Amino acid sequence: MITAGIDMGSRSVKVVLLEKSKGDKPYALKHAHLMLPGELDADEAAEKAFDEALAAAGLGRSDVKAVFATGAGRKQVAFASEGITEMSAGAKGANFMFPNARTVVDVGAEEGRGIKTDAEGRAIDFAGNEKCAAGAGSFAEAMSRALQLSLKDFGAASLKSERTIPMNAQCTVFAESEVVSLIHSSTPKEDIAKAVLDAVASRVCAMVRRVGIEGEVVLIGGMVHNEGFVQSLKTAMDVDQVSLPEHPEYISALGCALIAAERLH
């Protein structure tokens, strides 16, 4: 039995194909696929990404028993039988990868959120920043451009800093002005990078604290790849360990496919 989960994010489309397993877990990953929409409309991008995932897995649409969608553009996936909130999908996917997960931190390009989950991977509470990018990846990306660094180098640079520089701006436009002022005052790039990532982590942590930090903490979403942010988040949350999935950008799509499989049973 094959089920599919499609995560229609603001920057990319993620597709996960899940199959019934005979191993320790009831389901296993069949294939994961990521596609950048480019000039395609959201509905066209969903169709193309799904077809590409099926082709790579050697499957046809008739092989898939259920397709569930999540993400900001989930309503654009016309062929999905059901839409799942990002909170439910993220909690389910994180719990599948880390069964002891109770606190899920989801930080993508445009949104950040904290999710509390139970032992079965059901989201029981959440808090998010969907009205402002200051607690999301695009904020860090904009600041890295101001420093003329790649996002990867931006994160690595922050780890070289031992200074704490507060950033007071609550939006990208004003924060960029702060960064420019720091550049003009000859503040080292690594110190500015740490200040930016500390600011993002602080805002994310404030959301997570609204739902409570307990049990194993799991970080999902594209910001997992930014090692500087991971360190800033651990410091802000005052935890020794944050669990990181191997492919964090697929976790919500995975959760979607899992919920689809459970619904069939």
Image (cartoon, rainbow, N blue to C red):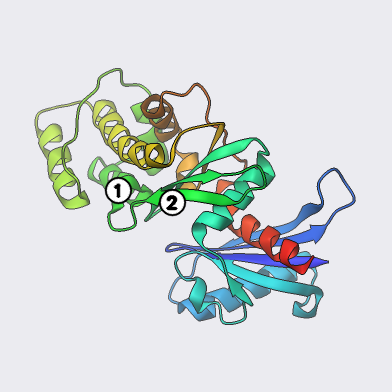
* x, y percent for residue 101: 60, 38
Looking at the rendered structure, the secondary structure element under dot 2 is loop
Q: Secondary structure at mark 1?
A: helix
Q: Is residue 76 above or below residue 157?
A: below
Which residue is denoted by mark 1 in the rendering?
139
The image quadrant of residue 143 is: top left
Q: Which residue is mark 2?
A: 108
N-term mark: 1 or 2: 2
In the picture, measured across the screen, residue 99 lies left or right of residue 24, that is left
Dot 2 amino acid type: Gly
Classify residue 114 by image quadrant: top left
Residue for point 56% across, 46% down? 248
Residue 65 picture quarter: bottom right
Along the horizontal axis of the image, is 150 left or right of 131?
right
x and y percentages locating residue 57 in the rendered image = 77, 65
- Residue placed at 45% from the left, 79% from the top? 41
Q: Position of residue 257 (x, y in %)?
A: 68, 62
Say which amino acid is labelled 1. Answer: Phe
Question: Image check: 120 left or right of 23?
Answer: left
Q: Are marks 1 and 2 in contact (CB under 8 Å)?
A: no
What quarter of the picture does the C terminus occupy?
bottom right
What quarter of the picture does the N terminus occupy?
Answer: bottom right
